[in-house]
Amino acid sequence: MNNSELLNRLLGIQKLHVVKSDFIGEEKLHLEVESNLSVASCPDCGRVSDQIHDESEAQMIRDLSIAERRCYLVYRAGRFKCEQCKKTFVERVEWKRSNVSYTERYERYVYQRVRRESVSQVAQDEGLSEEAVQAIFEYRAHLPWRAVPGKKRRRHAGTHK
Ligand SMILES: [Zn+2]
């Protein structure tokens, strides 16, 4: 297995591959990642576009630690142009929600820790502010049941959608 294959396997996000990796000091790891997909669907009309307009600025996205090194994904989200609406939009990805700088699985990890430990303990260990930890916890605690991975889909009388 070559190094990049190893890193891709470690990363384990199927839609991404690692293009560059760097240690920042001894404790941080930066993985520069790119999407394997070059299409995205328009948030307005749903039409799939393969016209990459440009790339957004690189974002640093906190991910699960690797071998106790804090891990950050460096990612440039693609901006696409919709043929139908003639508008541009930034792709949405399932491994991270919009407007936050953590991966979905990292949020899940923080949430699980806060259920067992104090907010201040988690914040200190993870190098996050208490506000950030609290915000992640609140967000996940209020997720509708259908968005929680691993939960079986159940029908409830009176459930909308
Ligand atoms: Zn559109």
Image (cartoon, rainbow, N blue to C red):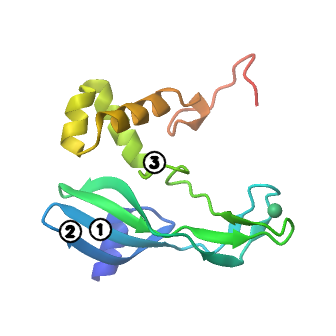
- Viewer-proximal residue, 152 or 160? 160
Q: In whole angstroms, how far apart are the C-alphas of marks 3 and 2?
A: 23 Å
Report the mark closest to the observer, 3 or 1.
1
Left or right: where does residue 28 sit relative to residue 112? left
Q: Position of residue 39 (x, y in %)?
A: 67, 71
Going by the picture, which residue comes out furthest to the right?
84
Q: Position of residue 18 (x, y in %)?
A: 39, 74
Q: Position of residue 129 (x, y in %)?
A: 29, 39
Q: Position of residue 124 (x, y in %)?
A: 19, 38
Residue topped by disc 2: 24
Is residue 68 positioned above or below 138 on the image?
below
* Tag 1: amino acid: His
* Ligand 1 quadrant in view: bottom right
Left or right: where does residue 96 sit relative to residue 65? right
Q: Are marks 3 and 2 in contact (CB under 8 Å)?
A: no
Which is nearer the N-term, disc 3 or disc 2?
2
Q: Which mark is residue 104?
A: 3
Image quadrant holding the N terminus, namely bottom left
* Tag 3: amino acid: Glu
Is residue 94 positioned above or below 10 on the image?
above
Residue 7, quarter of the rendered image: bottom left
The residue under the point 50% across, 70% down is: 57
* Tag 2: amino acid: Ile
